[in-house]
Amino acid sequence: MIVYHTQILLIFIIYLKQFIMNSKVTVLSDETTGAVVNLSENNPDYGYIRVQQQRTMIDDNGFLRRKSISALVPGTVSELNDAGFYAGQLIEGKIVVEESLEPFNTKTPERDLKVAGETGIVCTIGGQPIYRRTMLSFDAATTDALIKHDNVEELRAAYDSAKAKSALKANKDFDLGAE
């Protein structure tokens, strides 16, 4: 009986891993222009495509969450066009999250700062900013390299403040006071 339950559990884990944990990567088009290959603002010889994947991740509180993660795939415009990418195309691969205490781009390090939601607060560890980027990998065994931030109290205060402002606004919006 134990062997049977173990087999069922293994089948379920394989199912989760193959179908839920790692959905295929989707090629996206620009919402405004409809273009799949987007030109660099700095050099028209270079560009990128945007890809997106639904990933199942465990959040800081241990909850399983489905998240949409996107990445840019840079290259020369000619090579990106020659690759034949099209909107909605499903490709094998995985979008990987990489975090570091060193900037990925020394010219514009602020571009890759890990920011907590819509708070605008940079995630830090020991007062040092965390940098984050996403990349497409064709190696399914590649794992995320995450750094857990430690400025939790600062973030909690920002979220509590935002909640209080939202509640105050809601009370004002629905105030039916005497006129």
Image (spheres, rainbow, N blue to C red):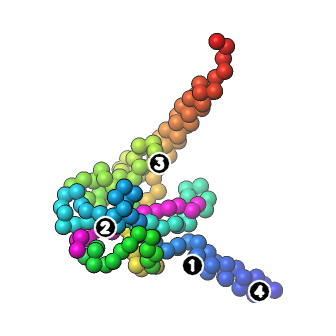
In the image, the segment drawn in magenta is 65-78
Q: Residue at x 76, y 82 (%)?
A: 5
Percent across and percent down for residue 151 are 46, 46
Spatial separation of the CA atoms under disc 2 and disc 1:
29 Å
Q: Which mark is residue 37?
A: 2
Percent across and percent down for residue 113 are 35, 52
Spatial separation of the CA atoms under disc 4 and disc 2:
50 Å
Quadrant containing the C terminus is top right
Q: Amino acid at mark 2?
A: Val
Q: Residue at x 67, y 82 (%)?
A: 11
Q: Amino acid at mark 1?
A: Gln
Mark 4 residue element:
helix
Q: Residue at x 38, y 72 (%)?
A: 86
Numbered disc in front, either 4 or 2: 2
Q: Work out whether mark 4 precedes mark 2 in sequence or the reverse, and give the earlier one.
A: 4
Percent across and percent down for residue 170 are 60, 30
Q: Label 4 crowding class (10 Å Cα cut-off): few <14, some 14-19, many 20+? A: few
Tag 2 and tag 3, C-beta contact below 8 Å? no
106 in magenta = no
* Residue at the spot of label 4: 4
Spatial separation of the CA atoms under disc 3 and disc 4:
44 Å
Mark 3 residue element:
loop
* Residue at the spot of label 1: 18
Spatial separation of the CA atoms under disc 1 and disc 3:
29 Å
Mark 2 residue element:
loop
Q: Is residue 89 above or below residue 30?
A: below
Mark 1 residue element:
helix
Q: Work out whether mark 4 precedes mark 1 in sequence or the reverse, and give the earlier one.
A: 4
Q: Work out whether mark 2 precedes mark 3 in sequence or the reverse, and give the earlier one.
A: 2
Please state which of residues 11 and 148 is positioned toward the viewer in this rendering. Answer: 11
Q: Which mark is residue 117?
A: 3
